[in-house]
Amino acid sequence: LFFMRQLFKDYEIRQYVVQVIFSVTFAFSCTMFELIIFEILGVLNSSSRYFHWKMNLCVILLILVFMVPFYIGYFIVSNIRLLHKQRLLFSCLLWLTFMYFFWKLGDPFPILSPKHGILSIEQLISRVGVIGVTLMALLSGFGAVNCPYTYMSYFLRNVTDTDILALERRLLQTMDMIISKKKRMAMARRTMFQKGEVHNKPSGFWGMIKSVTTSASGSENLTLIQQEVDALEELSRQLFLETADLYATKERIEYSKTFKGKYFNFLGYFFSIYCVWKIFMATINIVFDRVGKTDPVTRGIEITVNYLGIQFDVKFWSQHISFILVGIIIVTSIRGLLITLTKFFYAISSSKSSNVIVLLLAQIMGMYFVSSVLLIRMSMPLEYRTIITEVLGELQFNFYHRWFDVIFLVSALSSILFLYLAHKQAPEKQMAP
């Protein structure tokens, strides 16, 4: 129901197997986060939670490594007419190709313990974790920079009604020039038709040579006018996009003056500080090869209590604050990823590619959420990590946190450079004649 009525309500995904695979992946991904909440709250017996963790991971890994890649290959081959009769064979070949590269992915990274066998669950989680953590770090780096850039009124251009009217006037003048030149072309063609230059052209090879070597002045004018029309149409498209951008910027300026806009502007400053702090900490972690041993909540409470010198039950409050923090991380992660994926789907989807794209989104979503569990583990107090650590196996958890810091830093700095160049070019376009 959530798949059909909320996520993809504007698109008809006819294949029932695609709906089921996406829905099951989403359900088991959310169940993993539910089990994290159960770990903190102590819901169910520890043996029951361990069983459900194990079953949940086995099912989602089976879907991500075996089922989704096979069906992606199957629907890709089904869209190629030449391979339609042998689509099952070619689907298996594509799946084997995926498995080869997926398995080789683990070679360059120190992600496994020598104790792990070839068919162990750690072999799959470790490789899925590398892909998912890379994706998380890329999205987090871009989001940490783009969020304050989007919310803060400081980055808004000063757009007035005069700017919009001037650009609209240029657009209307360009459209008038296009219309007048197209009228001239139509009149020239009509004159040529009346003079018989269209129907009385010499035919054959020598006629073609003659028409090329002795072209009429009217045809040359038509060619030049057509080139001018093409250039003006391209200019009109650019002016239209710039006009729409100015209107959107003006709406953002008006929105920033409202109470809600001021609230988001304040959030923008907060996220700017967070972004700078996160980049600084990622740099420190990379340079000094450092990974935190204590979760941030417990560590923060301990520092505060020691500084103020007060009596405080650190263990009790760290549990409740960790529950709230992890809950916020889970909700924002799920919501943010689903919004990003559906925007991506609407941008590139077509009738033939919709099934493949939905399956790709399911693959990305599953890997993203499995990796979230690997990283959220560090945000939990030690006593709540036990079962998660046992289920995930002897993975090199420190590697994933260092890898996240590296990719996050690269993504954040690249996003800063990209947004800086885009922000710098915007006024230049506005001032261009």
Image (tube, rainbow, N blue to C red):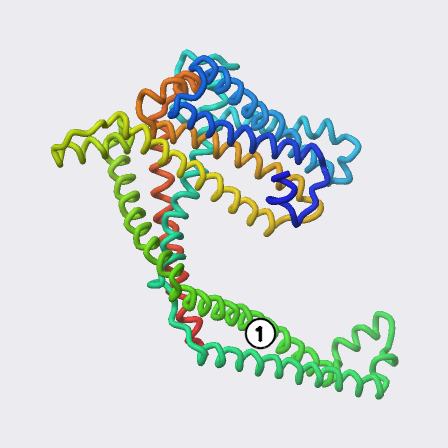
Q: Which residue is tagged 1?
A: 236
In the image shown, does 423 or 58 lie closer to the viewer? Answer: 58
Residue 296, percent across and down?
Answer: 28, 33
Tell me if residue 346 comes above or below residue 248 in the rendering. Answer: above
Q: Residue 346 location, x and y as percent?
A: 60, 50
Q: Relative to 196, does residue 291 appear above or below in the rendering?
A: above
- Kind of element beneath mark 1: helix
Would you identify the image quadrant in which residue 424 lies?
bottom left
Image location of residue 326, percent across then percent down: 38, 34
Q: Relative to 379, say whether 266 is above or below.
A: below
The answer to whether residue 386 is above or below residue 406 is above
Left or right, residue 194 beside residue 38: right
For label 1, the crowd category at 10 Å Cα-Cα, with few meaning under 14, some 14 to 19 and many 20 or more, is: some
Task: Using residue 136 as the reference point, say whether residue 4 is left or right of it.
Answer: right
Type of residue at label 1? Ser
Residue at x 85% of width, y 79% of height: 201
Residue 293 visible in the shown view = no
